[in-house]
Image: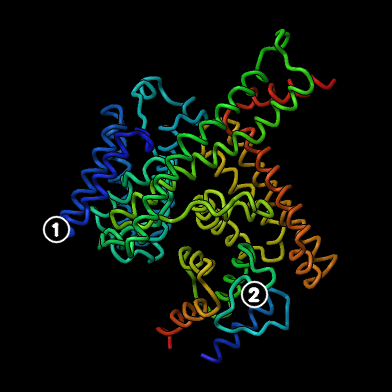
Amino acid sequence: MSLASPQFLLALLILATTFFYLPGLRLRQATLAVCNAGFLYLLIPNGASWLTLAAFLASGYATALLLRKWPSRTLLFAYLLVLVAGFLIVRKYDVVTIYLPDSILALGVSIVGLSYMLFRQIQFLVDTIEGQVDRVSWWGYLNFQLNFFMLLSGPIQRYQDFQAQWDRLDPVLEDGHAIRMAYFRLLLGLIKMTVVAAVFMSLYQQSAEILNLPLGTERQPGRLASIGHFLNILYCYPVYLYLNFSGYCDIVIAGASFVGLVLPENFDRPYVSRNVIDYWTRWHRTLGFWIRDYLFLPLYKGVAERWPQRAESLAFLCYFVAFFVAGIWHGPTTNFVIYGLLQAVGVSAAKLWERHLLKRRGRPGLREYMKSPRIRVAAIVATVNYECFSLLFFPVDVPTTIHMLGTVWRAFV
Amino acid sequence: MTEVHDQLQDVFRDVFSDPSIILNEGMTAEDVDGWDSLTHINLIIAIEKRFGVKFATAEISRLKEDSANVGSLLQALTGKLQPSK
C-alpha cells in the first residue's frame, strides 16, 4: 500500500481525528497495534514470510533479554552474524544465494521494510548491551519494529526514544497552530510525492529510455539532444528522489505526530551541503547517523585505540568499509556498491582537502576559507553535482548506466 | 568539578592541537575549529584514556547532536566519575 493512496490517507485522517478521544493509554496502544498489524497484513505475501518475520522479531527480543542478563560481546557478535546472513538470504544477495538449494529460494520469502528493521534491531541490541536501554518490553518492541509509520522506509528511530513515547502516547502538538501545520505538512508531502516528484520521474524516464536505445537504432539523439537528455538523467532523478522521499517523510512525521509519536527528521536542505561529509548529515539523516554510530564509530574507535599513530590514515579505510556496507544495504546489485563507494570517495576527498588546507593555511586560514561566501557557493555547486553524478548509478544496473553515458559520449565522437 | 574541567580542557587542547582553547559549558562543536565527527571520536578516546571511563555508542552520538555542548560532555563525564568517588 502506498502512503499517498486515498485509502491510507483516509484511514490516517480518521485515526488523527479520533485518536485522542480514546480513553486510556492501553486503548490507544491497542488501536495503534491493530493499525500496525493491518498494514503489515497487506504487505506480507505468504506464510513463509510471516514465519521468517516472526523468527526475526522473536530472536531479536530474546537476544536483548539475554544480553541484559549476560552482556556478552561474543553472544551479540554471533547473533549479528546469523542475523546478517539471514538478511542476505531473504534479500537474495548473490553472495549467499549461490550456495542455497532452489527449494529455499522457491519459498518466496519477502518482507517489506526488512532493511530498516535490521538496522533498528542492531541499534536496539548494541544499545541494550551497553546499558542504554532502561526497559525492554515485548509489546513496545513489537510496535517499534512494526510501526506502520516507519515500516516502509524509516526514519530510523532509536528504540529507547520510541519506547518513551509509546509509554505515554500523549498529544505532542501543542496548540491549534501546531495541528494546522501538521495537516499542512501532510498535504505538502502528498503534493511532493504524487505531483511534483512524478513530473521529474517522467522526465527522467523519457530521457533514460532514449539514451538506452540499442546501438545502431535510427532514433539515436544528436549532440544537442544528447546534452539535454544527459542533464535530465543527471538532475531529474535526484530531484525526484528528494521530493519523493522527503514527501514520504513529511507524511509519516506529520501522521505520527497526530498519535503522539515524534519521529526524527530525515532531511535538512541536503542540496546546500558544502561537501559529502556535510551532505550525509542532511540527506537521509537517520541513515547517515546510523552509519556513523553503528558502523564507522566502532570500526574507527577500534583501530584508533589499537594503532593511534596510524589512526588518521586508517580513518579512510573505515570510510570505505562503512559506505560499502551502506551501499549494499540499499540492495543486492552492483550499482549500489558503486553508489556506496562513490560516497566514500567523496567523504575521503573532503577530509583530505580539509587536511591540505589546514597544513597550508593553518587554523586561521581554514576559518577564513570556510567563511568565504564565494567558496561556499562553489563548494555547494561541486557537492550537488557530485551527488547527482553518484545517483546516476542508483536507479538502474551498471550496464544500463554505462550504456546511457556511452550514448551521450558517442554523440560527440 | 573544576579539576575535571581543567583536565578536560587539557584534553581538548591536545586533541585539537590548540593551546588557546578555553572551555566553557555553553561551547558547541561550532565554536571549536575542527570538531567534526572524526575528531569527536578522537576526543572521546582521549577522554576515556585520561579519566579511565567508557562511553556507550548512544552516548557518544548524543554528545555530537546539535543540542549538545561542553556542558553536556562535562555532565556525562562527571556522571561516570561519581560512582568511583
The N terminus of chain A: image quadrant: top left
Viewer-side label of 2, 1: 1
Name the amino acid type tagged 2.
Asp
Please name whichever residue, A355 or A79, is drawn nearer the observer in this view of the structure.
A355
Q: Which residue is mark 2?
A: B31
Residue at numbered disc 1: A23
Percent position (x, y) of residue B6? 60, 88
Looking at the image, is A236 positioned above or below residue A317?
above
What residue is shown at x 32% (from left), y 39% (from top)?
A9
Q: Which mark is residue B68?
A: none
Circle 1 chain = A
Instruction: Answer left or right for A148 relative to B1.
Output: left
Q: Residue at x 62, y 38 (%)?
A: A339
Q: Is residue A367 above or below residue B11?
A: above
Looking at the image, can residue A66 be seen?
Answer: no
Query: Under tag 1, what secondary structure?
Result: loop
Q: Position of residue A31 (x, y in %)?
A: 19, 48
Image color mode: rainbow
Quarter of image, res A221: top right
Residue A368 sits in quarter: bottom right
Q: Chain of mark 2?
A: B
Image position of A145 (left or right of B12): left
- The reply to whether residue A85 is in sight is yes
Where's residue A121, x and y in %?
38, 50
- Residue at coordinates 33% horizontally, 42% vertically from top-left? A56
Q: Distance between the Cα atoms at labels 2 and 1?
A: 48 Å
In what element is the residue under mark 2? helix
Cβ atoms under marks 2 and 1 closer than 8 Å = no
- Percent x, y of residue A179: 34, 57
Query: Mark 1 belongs to which amino acid?
Result: Pro
